[in-house]
Image (cartoon, grey):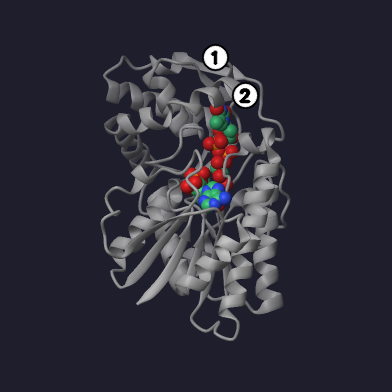
Amino acid sequence: MKKILITGGAGFIGSHVVRLFVNKYADYQVYNLDKLTYAGNLENLTDVEQKSNYHFVLGDITNESFVFELFQKEQFDGVIHLAAESHVDRSITDPNEFVVTNVLGTVNLLNAARTLWKGKEEGKRFYHISTDEVYGTLGEEGMFTEETSYDPHSPYSASKASSDHFVRAYGDTYGLPVIISNCSNNYGPNQFPEKLIPLFINNIRYNKPLPVYGKGVNVRDWLYVEDHAAAIDVIYHNGPNGETFNIGGHNEWKNIDLIRVLCKVMDDKLGRETGTSEKLITYVTDRAGHDLRYAIDSSKLQRELGWKPSLQFEEGIEKTVEWYLSNQKWLDGVTSGNYQKYYEKMYGSR
Ligand code: NAD
Ligand code: DAU
């Protein structure tokens, strides 16, 4: 019987990781520690909440004594750390929150693990979930490998880069059994509609403008969220201590091209004439420090641990749109209240 702590399990990616671990490993006790910020939502986990190997802990990773006492009480065998402030635009308006949660929160977890696992590191694992944004931006050519130097440009990516450095430093200094993965853009069910794909799905539902930053030429490398969760499973169980793995789907899209595909799928599913949603495209002021292109080389993960993405993008985007349209109550729930204030601050009242 193993006890695993998953932080940020009520968020987008975390909820898919929790579901996978609870369903796949009946002999694990899975603890989901989440503060339930605006991005955390227990409705993401209604299908597993009654399972006897699932436990929810409401709490804040920035609270040092709380984190330490939880580790002391539960004696975890492993940690999969996803809790974070995750939205680049919010990091531009409120960077401090990102330093506190992403850097200090991570260090609190590292301190608790190193203290309680001291002399008992065998079989333990501290797995830190990070992003390809730590590598900065690419030009027209090339891909991020595990050897690419860090060069973050947003307060979000700077805070994630800092947390990655702390994780590696704790491995080197204290012999903590750490492992890190850096993944590209995820999409799929349960993503909070501040990120491109669910934001645009929600706007198309209400015939609201689709705010494309700059000229729409930035490129992102998209991975279906369940494929990220599957990679996390493989890395958690089979990746050697001290290693880094890049995760990505070889699926690069220029924003404007992806948005056109999304508009077409939405028109089909909503029974609207093709071209209706594209008319909502509105070019707006570019994001400050906007990275031009991300592309992940995940060949190390594929070669060494045998992972590969299961879905082609065309299938993934169809599944994603279908999920949001079949779960409009979920969308309405998360876009009521404070979401409207956020939206007005970011995009004006249009
Ligand atoms: P998310 O914003 O959807 O979820 C974050 C979760 O963390 C929420 O449930 C929130 O309540 C929780 N949380 C925030 N602050 C907390 C605190 N102080 N204490 C406890 N819980 C707290 O994020 P996501 O998109 O699911 O990303 C999860 C992780 O994966 C992050 O570390 C992110 O950097 C990384 N990542 C995300 C992507 C992506 O495309 N979304 C890609 C690569 C890596
Ligand atoms: O690359 C991994 C990262 O992907 C994760 O670490 C982050 O947590 C996640 O938020 C995501 O960051 P991005 O900034 O790439 O994702 P976002 O969905 O915010 O934006 C995707 C692209 O779309 C980006 O080039 C900006 C653009 N965009 C975004 C929004 C919200 C627009 O043009 N208009 C918008 O309204």
Q: Secondary structure at mark 1?
A: loop
Instruction: Please give the label number shown on residue 349.
Output: 1
Residue 38 rendering spot, x and y as whole percentages: 50, 38
Identify the residue under disc 2: 215
Residue 219 rendering spot, x and y as whole percentages: 58, 37
Task: Write down which quadrant ligand 2 falls in.
Answer: top right
In the rendered image, the vertical position of residue 217 relative to residue 314, given as above or below = above
Q: Amino acid at mark 1?
A: Ser
* Side (left or right) of 256 relative to 139: left
In the rendered image, the vertical position of residue 174 relative to residue 138, given as above or below = below
Q: Are marks 2 and 1 in contact (CB under 8 Å)?
A: no
What separation in Å lies between label 2 and label 1 (alpha carbons)? 22 Å
Quadrant where the image shows the N terminus: bottom left
Q: Are there few (<14), some (14-19), or many (20+) residues within 10 Å of tag 1?
A: few
- Closer to the camera, 137 or 54? 54
Residue 283 rendering spot, x and y as whole percentages: 59, 18
Residue 225 rendering spot, x and y as whole percentages: 42, 49
